[in-house]
Image (spheres, helix red, strand yellow):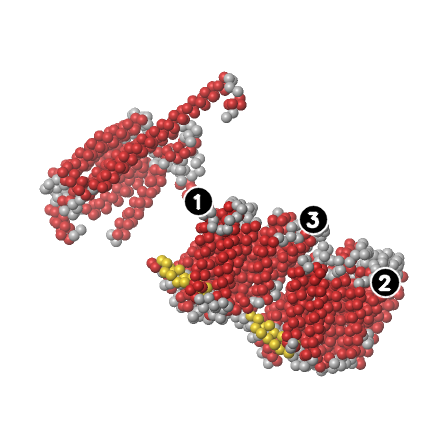
Amino acid sequence: MTPSHAAVSAAAAAEHGFLSPTGVEITFLLIGLVTFGAALVSVTTRQLVHAALWLVVALGGLAVEYLLLTAEFIAWMQVLIYVGSVVVLLLFGLMLTKAPIGRSPDADSGNRWAALLVAVAAAAALVWVVVDAFRTTWIDLDGPAAGSTRVTGAGLFQNWVLPFEALSVLLLAALVGAIVLSRRAKAADAAQQARAGGAAQQARAARDGQRPAEEGKH
Amino acid sequence: MTTTTNAVLVPLLPFLGAVAGLLLGRTAPGFVRPLAVLPTLASLVLAVLVAAGQGGGPALDAATQLTPTGSVPVDLALHIDGTAALVAVLVGVVATCVQIYSTGYLRDDPRYPSYAALVSLFTSAMLLVVYTGDLIVLLVGWEVMGICSYFLVGHYWETPQARAASLKAFLVTKLGDVPFLIGLFVLAGDAGSFRITTVLGTVAGGGLHHPTLAALLLLAGVAGKSAQFPLHSWLPDAMAGPTPVSALIHAATMVAAGVYVVARLLPVYQASAAAMTVLAVMAAVTMASAALAALAQDDIKRVLAYSTISQLGYMTGALAAGDRGAAVFHLLSHGAFKALLFLAAGVVIHAAGTNSLAAMSRTGNLRDRVPDAYWTMTVALLALAAIPPFSGFFSKETVLAAAEHAAMGHTVHVPAAAGWTVLVAGLVTALLTGAYALRLWLLAFHGRGADAPGHGRQPVAMNAVLWVLAVPSLAFGGLTYRLLPDWLGGDSLAPALTTSVLGTGLALAGGVLTYGAWRHTTARAARTPLGAVAAHPQADAGLVEAEAVAGHEPAYGDIASAPDPADPGRLLLGPLHRHAAAGFHLDALYRAAFVRPVTAGASLVRFLDREVVETYVRGAGALPRLLGAAVRRAQTGNVQTYVSALLAGTVVLAVAAVLVATGA
Amino acid sequence: MIDISESVMQFLLAFVVAAPLLGALAALLPAPPGLKGTSPEQAVLRHGVTVTGVVLLAAIALAAGFDHDHPSRMQATTDISWIPALHVRIHLGIDGISLPLVVLTALLTFLCALYSYVKPPAGPAPKAYVALLLLLETGTLATFAVLDLVLFFLAFETVLVPMYFLIARWGGEGRRAAAWRFVLYTLLGSVVMLLGLLLVGIKAGTFDMVALATDNGRSLTTSVQVVAVLAIGIGLAVKSPMWPLHSWLPDAHTAAPTTGSVLLAGVLLKMGTYGFVRILLPVAPDGFRTFAPALAAFAVVGIVWGSLACLALARRGARGDLKRLIAYSSVGHMGFVLLGIATMTPTGVNGALFANIAHGLITGLLFFLVGGLKERTGTTDLDTLAKDTGAALYGTAPRLGGLLAFGAVASLGLPGLAGFWGEMLALFGAFRPAAGLSRPAFVTFMAIGALGTLLTAAYLLVVVRRVCMGAAPEQTPRLPDVRGFEFAAWTPLVVLTVLAGLWPKALLGLTDPAVQQFLAGGTR
Amino acid sequence: MHLAYPAVLSALLFCTGLYGVLARRNAILVLMSVELMLNAVNLNLVAFDVYLSKAARDTLHSGQALTLFTIAIAAAEIGIGLAIVLAVYRNRGTSAIDRLRDAAEGHGDDSDDSAGSDSTVPGAEKAEATA
């Protein structure tokens, strides 16, 4: 941090104390409370589907926060990808694993109290460090939006082309991987079912006494 | 060739012969006999040349460094004075005789090659001891002799007696060698050299700080090697070896080495009156007790063994009286006649098929069966009993004369008490010597009863050797007592009147007593039949002896004595006989004092090693195992637990890092 | 003896150290570049013989080119920077102290390779065996040739791995436990030793042994020296092994294959005592002086302890194992070596170095012989072998019996054979220890140690009596006597034992100047 | 706007996700919590990107670019993750994380864990499924 910048931001923060919040700040704070609350409910609720729905609320709240931070492209991406696809995918996952509808008493593992302890400790540590470090830092949201589609697109395709392309390869690989995983599981499933069927047939045959004993041995 | 070169070759030739014999023994059996006899013979000739070259003049010294040690170097040194030259000739003569004798004695023995090589190696080691001028090299020869003796005593390793005797021989002598080594350290520590000349120079200059300590430590080694009380008990048992070995090692040479070493280092002893007194007491106890024991033995070779111990006592007695010349004189003459006695005994054992005097006394006509042995043994026994004019008379008289001289207080460095001790013991022993010599002669050659089975004639090699050795036994003393003082660098060795009369008279008295006892008891011999004779009368002499040795204990219940009421020794000794036969129970004492504690210590160490040391090791292993078991319990397989722990740790570390970074 | 230029000497030494390593790698290749054999197994064994043979030749050339007039000077030195950040250098060199050990190692490994060429050890495929053998050789040779503390430690540790596998894969009964015990025990010692080495290196500012020896402990305070000697000493004492840290040795020896035992006794134990002489004596003399009486006391206890343990094993009905017995005898013999070192006198240290070599030759021979005996009779258990009266090996296999007796006699320290000089000089050193050490204490140690020689003689001769002698050999079947390859493997050891006994100057002439220099303050 | 607001919110969201990851039994809920954590990071990235680009100290918009990448990778992750969870569910009949304990020391409670499935499941597939 060069001295001039430090001076500028310090001056800005001095103008804007915590006790005289701007409108954006108040909005951000309220939406943030909603988001945090939704996230908390999402990780504590005993109804699995509700958890996914509360997650939608939390993710949507985050999208609004992005907007407040003038990062509009990211906000729309958030809505499209997270709310639109990821949560849907998770809901499908819940359905495919025959997750119980309604309250399931064993949604949390026995590790809950340790988890709470770690999480609270981590939160305390992080908040302390963050507040300590950025107490006086001020974001100047006036002027042109920092994250309009134009700006983001220009940045992405001027400076980040190669990683972007690499990312597409990664996505392709993930796609193929997911397919392979599900397919092999299915093949194994089929084989297993065939074996189980064979065994049942064998057992039935043995019961009926129609099969010679020596063939039943293997 | 110079005398020095000859002197170097004297010990070297038998050594090379031994190496060649060991290497070629099995592959080229034809060379074994020449390889055994010729190097020894050659070294005898060279020893005679060396003696002639030395001529009794000043000592011949030559040295080269054998090795540096970091402080006191070890030298390969020659120190040949008259004594050394003469003793080397004796060793050469006896060794050559024994090698020739062995070619006949162990004619058919498959183990002859290794036997002959070991005898050669032994000869070489003895010659090394005689010629060397360095104490550590002397120790090398000294111990090599010990190990050769071990192997040769164990020659008949099928018999339990030989197995036990070989082990005992080595360990008892080694028991003496340990203090001997320390004694050498003491000498070298003060003198700054292992050279004998330097050590003696230091002694003469009074530079020896602890002469008594050094002398007594050396004395332990000497007692072990020369079979002096209390370390003599191995020698009678060593008779389980072949007879030629007994003749060479246990009569003429190895046991003489101890006396020789004391003779060499006599000034060290003379520097300490206490050491001289101890030496005198040791000599007195040795000679008297061994002579008593000799009177009670049944095995002919054990009789000779005890007589050897007793005669060695004379030699140490002479040294205790401060007369080196007398000791060496007796060593030389004794070497000749005792070798003869053993070799003749070997012939007798072969002919009789037994080594037991009790059995021989029930065998008729043994005298005519082996006339050579009979006559030569008679000569040797007369020499042993010190009857004039045989050589033993002259040498023993010099010892008694020296003792008398010391007792009168005429000898410097020697306490009169030491002289008296030796003199009285010497006279008593003279009586006993006459007694056991005659007992041996009577029992062996004048038995009555059935004839022994015929064995054919003894090999010429064996008989010829007997006559060769009979010559010095007969005449050595009388011919040389005038010449020897020049060589031995001492006083006159002529017999003195008082001691001559006393000694000879006592010996004769002993003889008369024994004869009377024998007349009294011999009638009983026929009534109690005894005797076990070897099963293979036609076999090799060595084999017969091995069987005789192995058969003595089963036949008579004891290795040393036989329950023979016809034994004159039993009558003469009375209640003492039982103890004398057992060597005055010294073995039992050793068993209680050394063997038992060591065995107990071994068991204790075994226990400690298994239980205590091992427990520490196991304990060291158990601690990590406990920790491991504790950590194992944490491995639940639940990923969430693992991650919780991981993150908790991360938080702690992060907080710590922040605190450190902010300097809090 | 022979004038070889310095650069050739440098190459020879580097070759001696590196060639076994390259050979080990080559042995793992699919087609080892050795001579073609009838089968892949034979080919790889032949490869082992070739490589160790070449190394032995190089070591002999090294010995021939060594300047025998200046054995105290480091010769054939190579000094290359390796890890500059840590000041670690590849510094090789030999002087009169290390040269005999290098030659001994090369010889023993060659003999082992030769022996196992005809008689491959029972176990997995010989390919790994040969590779491990060569790796072992490179580790030991490097230990004796390097002059840098960190490299020394590396070489010291390198040896553990192949030895572990040799015992665990090709060993006999109970090999797994024995191998674990061996490796854990020695590693534990090594960890402590590493700490000590680092302490010395950091406090003195260099890891170079020559520089440290020249410095002679002047740049280390006494307390640092004391701690360093304690730490390094424990590591080396485990390896030596010093009583009471010896209990890994009997197990390892009992379980190891014949060649493993030979190398373990003949070479590996020497590394510990070599470290004492090479590192502790010159680098931290003050610290060593503090511990010298304790070391001597432990050494003497080891002498007596080893002998008594052997006596207990040799007794009838004790079910004593011959290999175990020889292992305990090693404890006793190494006790003499440690006693010699503890005297801090040139005499004692010379004796220790001599006893080192002698023990390598003699115990190597004994393990070979016992291996041969086991192969013939199928057991090394004394009671099974000896039955009632004895195994009568003199009768059933005279040459083998004779050699065994020779080995026993050499081992009991008979003058005129190699075993004597080391023991004698160690005792003589203890008779007059260095200034600053308690003379009465050392004289007592000497007396007890000398009695130890008596006990040593006792158990060895009892063994000879029970194995070589015995009644009625004609009833038992004759065993095959010593065969050609066994002669080839054993004769060099016998010849060298006799030679070292008769001509001790060959070794003492090499070590004495170097030792004198070490102890006199290390000025070069 | 104060940078502290988005930073603190992001920290809180992250820890909420953390709690979910550690406390939830169902594997899909764990995945949801992971998404929460990723989003918390995204918020951080965006906030700092805006701050830095306004202060003209970063002209590459690396924060937003990285956010986009994260979103994409998160999408891929959720796809693969769900596929794995489904495979596990098919093989084991459960998607409860604390019952997948093949890595446990002693393996004692493994048999009753896989009781829902049967023991003919090949070991290789098991290993793959738990990977």
Q: Amino acid at mark 1?
A: Gly
SS for callout 2: helix
Same chain, marks 1 and 2? yes
> Marks 3 and 1: which is nearer the front?
3
Q: Are marks 3 and 1 in contact (CB under 8 Å)?
A: no
* Residue B181 visible within the image: yes
Label 2 sits on residue: B369
The residue lying at 66 percent from left, 50 percent from top is: C479
Q: Which residue is mark 1?
A: B628
Image x and y of residue C339, in percent: 53, 63
Q: Quadrant of the rendered structure where residue D22 is?
A: top left
**Is label 1 in a helix, a strand or a loop?**
helix
Instruction: Quickly name the residue at label 3.
Output: C476
Q: Quadrant of the N terminus of chain B?
A: bottom right
Q: Residue furthest left?
A: A143
Q: Chain of mark 2?
A: B
Q: Position of residue B161 (x, y in %)?
A: 73, 57
- B202 on left or right of B288: left
Q: Nearer the viewer, residue A167 or B41?
A: B41
Q: Pick whichever, B600 or B71, lies toward us.
A: B71
Q: Amino acid at mark 3?
A: Thr
In the picture provided, is A20 more to the left or to the right than B122? left
Residues tagged by mark 3 and mark 1 found on one chain of the structure:
no
Residue lying farthest right?
B523
Residue at figure coordinates x 49%, y 63% from the top left = C61
Q: Residues within 10 Å of mark 2 (few under 14, many from 20)?
A: many
